[in-house]
Amino acid sequence: MTDVNKIELIRVTDSCELSHELRTIYEEAFPPDERREWTQFIELLKNPNFFLKAIYNQKKLIGILTIWNLHEFRFIEHFAIQDAERGKGFGTQVVNQLLAGTSIPLILEVEEPVTETAHKRIQFYERINFSVCKREYFQPPYTNDKNEVKMLLMSYPEKISEVYFLQIKDRIYRMVYGINE
């Protein structure tokens, strides 16, 4: 792969960097129940455990990544490459950069494989050695007017054990979604 296709992950740290184009990528990639209100991002930028990254190829914005440092693991909350840029290896490059930059596990949520798109998404992560956790998991609603969403957790490098699943779920619910069960 040449440098022409090398992607860059640029951290967004200030609300003035939240461009309309970044917002459009986010809102087109995720249905309303699976995304935060844009105003929530402004507040999250102040959280030292939250990282919003704009994904660039040749200085062109092509995607968005939100990731949480939850100490024992990192949680990918949102990851999207623009439709026109999919299938070019950019997603793999982003995940490989994340894996190279950490020695702790990566955890993420994916939709259940009930659509072809969801099935392809799971296959994408499995090709780069993520494992599906079979335990029942729901993404909590972001706001009172949104619904919870049945999802699957995926992990790298190891599959999530039964005991560790409850700890991971609790940490995600508390730190990402602000829920204490």
Image (cartoon, rainbow, N blue to C red):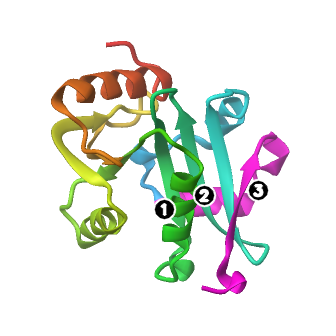
Whole-percent x and y of residue 64? Answer: 60, 58
First in residue order: circle 3 vs circle 2: 3
Tell me which residue sits at (41%, 28%) in the image: 172
- Name the residue carrying label 3: 19
- The tag on residue 64 is 2
Disc 3 marks which amino acid? Ser
Numbered range of the magenta stretch: 1-29
- Residue 180 as seen in the image, left or right of residue 104: left
| Dot 1 alpha-carbon crowd within 10 angstroms: few under 14, some 14 to 19, many 20 or more | some
Residue 170 inside the magenta-drawn segment: no
What SS does tag 1 mark?
A: helix
Quarter of the picture containing the C terminus is top left
Q: CA distance from mark 1 to mark 2?
A: 10 Å
Q: Quadrant of residue 24?
A: bottom right
Question: Disc 3 to disc 2, how far (Cα)?
Answer: 11 Å
Q: Residue at x 79, y 73 (%)?
A: 59
Q: How many marks?
A: 3
As drawn, the residue found furthest toward the front would be: 103
Q: Which residue is mark 1?
A: 29
Spatial CA span between label 3 and label 1: 16 Å
Give, as a three-letter code, the residue at label 1.
Answer: Ala
Residue 92 at what x, y percent from top left? 48, 69
